[in-house]
Amino acid sequence: MALAPFEVLVAEHGAVVLRVCRALVGVQEADDVWQETFMAALRAYPGSGDVRNREAWLVAIARNKAIDHHRKAGRLPIPADDFPGEFGGAGVSGGVGTGARSAVDSGSERDGVERAAEAGQEAALVWSALAALPPKQREAVVYHHLAGLRYAEVAALLGNSEAAARRAAADGMKALRALLLEPTRSGQ
C-alpha cells in the first residue's frame, strides 16, 4: 500500500486531532500538543504503511502526547477555565458553538454579536461539563463523539474491552446531559 504525502494526512485528520488535543489538555496548550503529535507522526510515517486506520493512529499519538504534557506540567487535565467561548467549536470552522454566524444572516450586526456571545457561553458550559466527567468517561466521549472513532478503537486507546468503552461513553453522555440540563430543571 503506497503512502499518501504527509500533507494529505494532516489535511484529512488535523481538525479531529486538534479537537482531541483541546479536550485532553485545554485550549491554551492544544496547539503545542497538536504540533508534537504531528511531529511524532512525521518521524514514524515512513514505517506506518501497515496502519489501517490512520485517524485512530493519530488520536493514539495525540493521547500519548497529552499524557506527556500533563506529566511534564504536573497538573490535572482539562481545567474548565481553559475553554473560552470563542473556541467552542473545538477546531471546526463554523461548527456548533463557534459563533460563526454572519451579521447578514441575523438581520443586524447587533443580533449577530448577541448570538455569537450566547453560542460562546453555551460552548463554555459544554466544555466545563466535559471537564467535570471522570477521566475514562471524558476520554470515551471525546474519542467516540468528537474524534469519531469506533468503540473498538476507543477500547484500544483506553485499555478496556469494547463493551467497557461503550459503557463509559454512554455513562459520560448521560452525565453530560444531567450536568447540562440541571440549570434548566431548576428554572434558570
Image (spheres, rainbow, N blue to C red):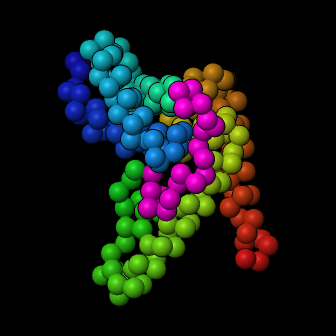
Side of 54 relative to 21 (left or right): left
Quadrant that contains the C terminus: bottom right
State which quadrant residue 155 falls in.
Answer: top right
Question: Which residue is depicted at the point 38% across and 18% down?
Answer: 51
Circle count: 0
Side of 40 relative to 46 (left or right): right
Q: Residue furthest top?
A: 47
Residue 168, image x and y in percent?
69, 37
Question: Which residue is depicted at the point 42% across and 34% down?
Answer: 33
* Position of 17 relative to 40 (above/below): below
Residue 159, image x and y in percent?
63, 21
Specify whether residue 85 is painted magenta: yes
Question: Which residue is depicted at the point 61% across and 61% down?
Answer: 125
* Position of 39 relative to 94 (above/below): above
Residue 137, image x and y in percent?
67, 39
Question: Which residue is depicted at the point 34% across and 29% down?
Answer: 38
Regarding residue 152, the answer to whether it shows in the image is no
Side of 136 relative to 34 (left or right): right
State which quadrant residue 178 falls in.
Answer: bottom right
Residue 150, image x and y in percent?
53, 34
The magenta stretch is: 70-90
Side of 95 relative to 6 (left or right): right
Regarding residue 59, the answer to whether it shows in the image is yes
